Amino acid sequence: TSSLACVLNPVLSNFAEVITAGRVGCDVHMDLNDPSESIIIPKDVDVVINTAASFGGERAEDLILAESVNVLGVVKLCQACTKAKVRQLVLVSSVFSCLDKSSPFYSVYSMTKKHSDDVAQLYNLMFGLPISIIRPSQFYGGGKDQQHQPFLTSIINNAANNQDIFLYGSNDALRNFIHIADVAEIIARVVKHKILGTYKCMSTKNVSYSEVAKAAIAAFGSNSSIKFLKEHPDIIDNVFELDDRLYQLIDYFPQIPITLGMKMEADYRRKVS
């Protein structure tokens, strides 16, 4: 029931029978916090795709939950896949797993995602389970607020409501945003092509926050202005080195630039309003 799973499901359904698993509203009940013996993969499943994640927080309890879901939960899932003789496990990680402790964006989430990737790679070495680790950059779209990207959501909301968009400092900070539909298509092709290994999954172009804001303003046809609040500290860049090896393997590069992505968001809101 994650935003990615909701977009991914119909893409996979074009060529496969899809069974959903999760804590609520799914075909099979599965909670990565449960004991390992409770995590059972249904018979004759070929591929398992894990989109579950804990995003952490500021409390010690959040660290415990993130480790439990993102790391121990992945080990349990690997073990269940081995027992069920699954032919491929696809783990949706994050490009934030590439961050080190010196980054101001290093967090419980990035640390546990790195730990999750490491433990999955070790499991593959020890037990031979075929594993694909896909590391998307910040994805958006699908008609849902980006609950884990509140600033991006505020830009879209302000543009939609003809309100001015304020950017702190004087640095027009760079980010890498990839549309959720592109992520879904990439994962589907990883399954179809049986691609194994660890890969980044990013837009081929970094964008500044002002570019995002301009795209949102144009998409909604709004009268919003973009204003830099130079009396505040700068927002710093957070970008990663592009690696297009995966796109070469699956013969697909991200197709949705930020201008089209914002137009899709505007169209969706008009449709449901």
Image (cartoon, rainbow, N blue to C red):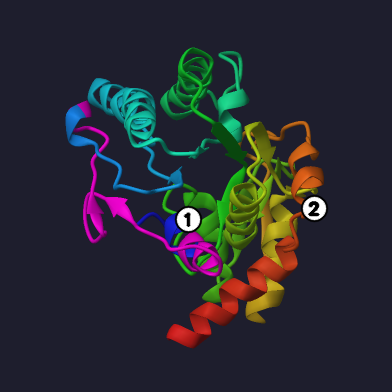
Looking at the rendered structure, the kind of residue marked 1 is Leu
- Say if 125 sits above or below 110 in the image: above
Q: Which residue is at 53% across, 79% downward?
A: 268
Q: Secondary structure at mark 1?
A: helix
The Cα–Cα distance between marks 2 and 1, rounded to whole angstroms, is 21 Å
Q: Is residue 206 visible?
A: no
Q: Which numbered dot is residue 4?
A: 1
Rendered residue at 26%/59% (across/down): 26
Image-quadrant location for residue 259: bottom right
Mark 1: few/some/many CA within 10 Å (<14, 14-19, 20+): some
Give the residues drawn in magenta, as a range. Answer: 8-36
**SS category of the residue bearing label 2:** loop
| Position of residue 239 in the picture relative to residue 19 (left or right) | right
**In the image, is residue 21 part of the stretch drawn in magenta?**
yes
Q: Position of residue 163 (x, y in %)?
A: 55, 70
Q: Main secondary structure of the magenta part?
A: loop
The tag on residue 251 is 2
Tally of marks = 2
Q: Can residue 121 be seen by looking at this rendering?
A: yes
* Quadrant (top left/top right/bottom left/bottom right) for the N terminus: bottom left
Instruction: Say if the magenta span includes residue 54.
Output: no
The kind of residue tagged 2 is Asp
Q: Nearer the viewer, mark 2 or mark 1?
A: 2
**Residue 212: % across, % down:** 69, 59
